[in-house]
Amino acid sequence: MNWRSSSALMGTDRPEEVDAAFDRAEELVGVAVIGLALNHPDAVAILPRVARALESEGGELRHQGRVALAHVARLHSTVDRRCLELLRSHPRGSEADDDLWSYVPHRRLPWWLWRHHLGERMVWILRDKWRS
C-alpha cells in the first residue's frame, strides 16, 4: 500500500494494514481509517480502528476518527460501546453525532446523545412554531 497517496488509502479494506500504520505512526493513518470504514463489509472489524483514532493525541486524527465513525453509522447502522465512550469526550455537533442519531436505532444510543439531539429538536420546533 502506498502510504504517501491519500487516494490509494481511501480504498483500503484490510484492517491489518491500518493496525500496522498505527504502529508505525504513519501520517495518513486517519485517511486509511476512513477508507476502511467506507470499504470493509464488517463493522466489527472497523470499530476498533475507529476507536484507536478517536483516542489519539492528534486533533486531525481524532477528527478523522469521527468522520470514520459517521461512515460506519451510515453504512452499517451500528456502533460499539467503546466508540461511544470515546466520542463523549469530543465536542458535540460533529458529523458522528448526527449520523449516529440518524442511522443507529435510538434505543442503542446513550443518554448524552439523546439530550444533545432532543434539545436541538425542541429549540427548532419552538422557534418554528412561534414564527407561524
Image (cartoon, grey):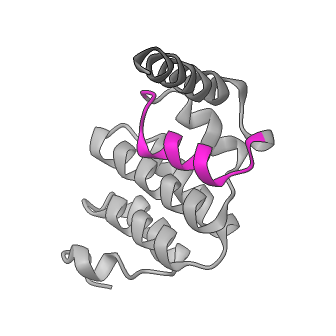
Kindly identify the residue that appears in the image at 27 percent across and 63 percent down. Answer: 28
The residue most toward the front is 132
Q: Is residue 95 magenta?
A: yes
Q: Which quadrant of the rendered structure holds the C terminus?
A: top left
Magenta residue span: 91-106
**Quarter of the image where one finds residue 5:** bottom left
Q: Position of residue 106 (x, y in %)?
A: 74, 42
Is 132 displayed left or right of 103 in the figure? left
| Figure check: 96 above or below 121 | below
Q: Position of residue 19 (x, y in %)?
A: 49, 66
The residue most toward the right is 107
Q: Which quadrant of the rendered structure holds the N terminus?
A: bottom left
Which sits in the foreground, 34 or 19? 34
Is 34 displayed left or right of 74 in the figure? left
Kindly identify the residue that appears in the image at 30 percent across and 38 percent down. Answer: 59
Q: Is residue 63 magenta?
A: no
Kindly identify the residue that appears in the image at 59 percent across and 57 percent down. Answer: 73
